[in-house]
Amino acid sequence: MGNLQIDLLGTSFSIQANESPEYLEKLLDYYRKVVNQVDKEAKIKDPLKVAIISGVMICDELCKEKQKLQFTNQTINKQDLVEAEEIALRIIENIDKVI
C-alpha cells in the first residue's frame, strides 16, 4: 500500500492506495505533465478547469489506446482464423490423398 503527497494546482493533500509508492509517483508525474501541457497551451488560469481538461485529455488517450488494442486483437483473431483455415484445408487434402 502506498501513500502519495499531491501538491498541484494550488492544492495539497495525501492519498493512500493499494499500489506501490513508485507506481503512484509515476501516475502523478504523468498527470503533472498533462496539467502543465494544458496550462501552457490553453492559457486557462482556473485550476478546476485545468484539472478537468487534463482528466478529459487522459480519458481520450486511454480510449484511443483501448481502440488500438481492440483493433489489434481483432486483426490477430482474423489472422488466426485464416491460419486455422489453411491448416484445416491442408489436413483435408492429406486425408483425401490417403483415402
Image (tube, grey):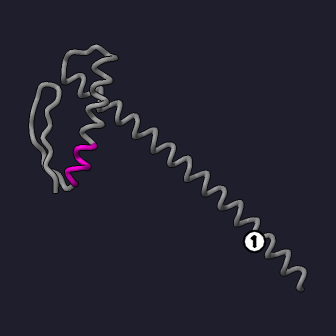
Q: Position of residue 64 (x, y in %)?
A: 46, 38
Q: Which image quarter: residue 92?
A: bottom right
Residue 81 lies left or right of residue 32; in this view the side is right
Q: Amino acid at mark 1?
A: Ala
Determine whether 57 is above or below 44 in the image.
below
Residue 76 position within the rendered picture, expressed as x and y whole percent measured from the top left = 60, 55
Seen from the viewer's position, the closer of residues 20 and 84 is 20
Main secondary structure found in the magenta portion:
helix
- The residue that appears at 29% across and 32% down in the rendered structure is 55
Whether 99 is among the magenta residues is no
Magenta span: 20-26
Instruction: Return the residue at label 1.
Output: 88
Left or right, 20 with respect to 64, comes to: left
* Count of numbered tags: 1
| Helix, strand or loop under label 1 | helix
Image quadrant holding the C terminus, namely bottom right
